[in-house]
Amino acid sequence: MKKRILLLEDDVTLNETIVDYLENLGYEVATFYDGFDAQDAIYEQSFDLLLLDVNVPDINGFEILKNTRAEGRTTPAIFITSLNSMSDLESGYESGCDDYIRKPFALKELKLRIETILKREFFHSEHEKIEIGEGIYYDAHNDTLFVQDKEVKLNNKDAKLLKLLMQNRGNLVTHEMIYERLWGYDEQVSESALRTYIKNLRKYLGSEKIVSIKKLGYKLIS
């Protein structure tokens, strides 16, 4: 499945150049020119990486990422900017970015930075094992569920769903986000199958841990 990247860049020429380059590499790119539209998309959709220009209309990249992190979203982010002072660099990392690339830059440099970050799966987590409930842990490094110190064998889609819920813990994961991650382009989406996967996970996590948001999706409670 293609990795999804959000690009916020108000320079039309640079925006189009980056989009063409990344799409030729096999990425799916959602592109935006102003901060508010990009911020709305981050809340409504699922992305594997955020590429954020800092100086853009309406709300700058620093503020977007601060708001995103405050909502508990851990999607990795790279700032693209012409700012070059140490205070700007500090502001970028303090807002929660994972990397920083200064204009002008070579597209291959951007490619290498993206590939390096996407090799990781979990971000902004201090612990390898993340507690879900009493005696229930998720091993973020190995995508493994443990219940009372015993590893739980999950099927492929159950495991993908748990990972998606964990990456967005405390936030709504829409049906559309789930369909995008769990089913390939050549597979038929199944609502009944999704309900089964949710039921399977609830057996291990507890029914109260995965909340159904009517007609919207699901949320894993912190």
Image (cartoon, rainbow, N blue to C red):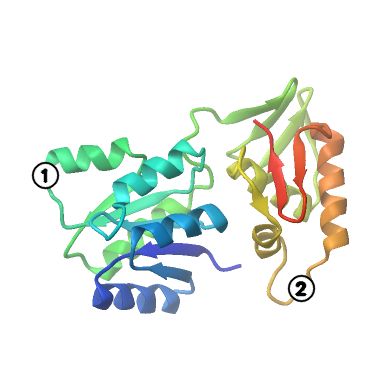
Q: Residue at x 79, y 22 (%)?
A: 148
Residue 115, visible in the rendered structure: no
- Quadrant containing the C terminus is top right
- Quadrant containing the N terminus is bottom right
Q: Which residue is drawn at 40% across and 53% down?
A: 116
Residue of label 2: 187
Q: Which residue is drawn at 82% across and 31% down?
A: 206
Residue of label 1: 85
| Secondary structure of residue under mark 2 | loop
The answer to which quarter of the image holds residue 166 is: top right
Q: Position of residue 118 (x, y in %)?
A: 46, 54
Residue sitting at the far left = 85
Q: Nearer the viewer, residue 31 or 125?
A: 31
Reply above or below: 219 against 188: above
Q: Where is residue 164 in the image (x, y as percent from the top left)?
A: 64, 49
Amino acid type indicated by mark 2: Glu
| Secondary structure of residue under mark 1 | loop
Residue 193, visible in the rendered structure: yes
Q: Is residue 184 left or right of residue 4?
A: right
Q: Nearer the viewer, residue 88 or 100?
A: 88
Q: Which of marks 1 and 2 is in front?
A: 1
Q: How crowded is mark 2: few (under 14 residues within 10 Å), some or many (20 or more)?
A: few
Amino acid type indicated by mark 1: Ser
Res. 118 mark: none
- Disc on the earlier residue, 1 or 2: 1
Q: Where is residue 177 in the image (x, y as percent from the top left)?
A: 64, 59
Q: Where is residue 135 in the image (x, y as percent from the top left)?
A: 75, 21
Reply above or below: 71 against 3: above
